[in-house]
Image (cartoon, rainbow, N blue to C red):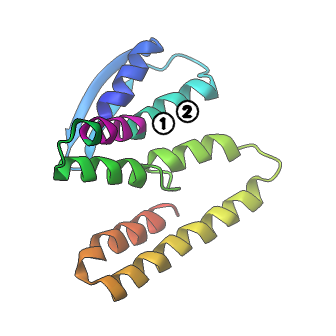
């Protein structure tokens, strides 16, 4: 995932200042270079989930069916969720900020995020304890948006 971001940054000529490894992933600190085109930012953001989907596809086609295959698919999907801390939400943030309908779109995003919490709660109730991490992540991500 992070390799996808890093490779895209290198392709776009972004200067990487440092990489910070933590329990939550990798934080990539870059040198500030004035105004960054929105398309480039979106490309960098979406390259992480794209790397996950590519890994899933390569493992699937190769016939190697492992937990890594499924994990890669779900990491790609998870990172596209509409929360600012994740790649999908960061892309949405870039697209709606300054829009004529920004206020309405933010309300819609809040409703979608609440829907994700409800959906994950129902999954947990019907499917068992295996869905608790999804529910917990949805709640934590929602409250970190405020």
Q: Which residue is drawn at the image coordinates 42% and 20% (left, top)?
A: 9
Among the 4 quarters of the image, the one containing residue 7:
top left
Q: Residue furthest right?
A: 100
Image location of residue 50, percent across then percent down:
42, 36
Label 1 close to label 2 by CB (< 8 Å) = yes
- The quadrant of the image that shows the N terminus is top left
Write down the residue under mark 2. Answer: 42
Q: Confirm whether residue 1 shows in the render.
A: no
In the figure, is residue 92 to the left or right of 140?
Answer: right
In the figure, is residue 84 to the left or right of 7?
Answer: right
Residue range highlighted in magenta: 50-59
Q: Residues within 10 Å of mark 1 (few under 14, many from 20)?
A: many
Write down the residue under mark 1. Answer: 46
In the rendered image, residue 48 lying in the magenta stretch gets the answer no
SS at circle 2: helix
Image location of residue 115, percent across then percent down:
55, 74
Q: Which residue is drawn at the image coordinates 26% and 28% (left, top)?
A: 19
Q: CA distance from mark 1 to mark 2?
A: 6 Å
Among the 4 quarters of the image, the one containing residue 114:
bottom right
Among the 4 quarters of the image, the one containing residue 97:
top right
In this rendered view, identify the residue nearer to me: 73 or 58. Answer: 58
Give the answer, above or below, for where 31 lies relative to 141: above
Q: Residue furthest bottom?
A: 125
SS at circle 1: helix
Image location of residue 66, percent across then percent down:
16, 49
């Amino acid at each position: 995932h992070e390799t996808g971001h890093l490779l895209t940054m290198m392709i776009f000529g972004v200067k990487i200042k440092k990489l910070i490894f933590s329990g939550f992933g990798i934080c990539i600190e870059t040198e500030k270079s004035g105004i960054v085109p929105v398309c480039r930012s979106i490309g960098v953001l979406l390259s992480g989930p794209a790397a996950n989907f590519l890994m899933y596809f390569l493992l699937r086609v190769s016939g190697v069916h492992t937990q890594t295959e499924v994990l890669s698919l779900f990491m790609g999907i998870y990172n596209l969720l509409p929360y600012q801390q994740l790649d999908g939400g960061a892309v949405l943030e870039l697209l709606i900020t300054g829009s004529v309908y920004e206020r309405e779109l933010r309300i819609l995003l809040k409703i979608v995020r609440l829907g994700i919490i409800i959906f994950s709660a129902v999954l947990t109730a019907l499917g068992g304890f295996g869905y608790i991490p999804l529910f917990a992540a949805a709640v934590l991500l929602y409250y970190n948006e405020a």
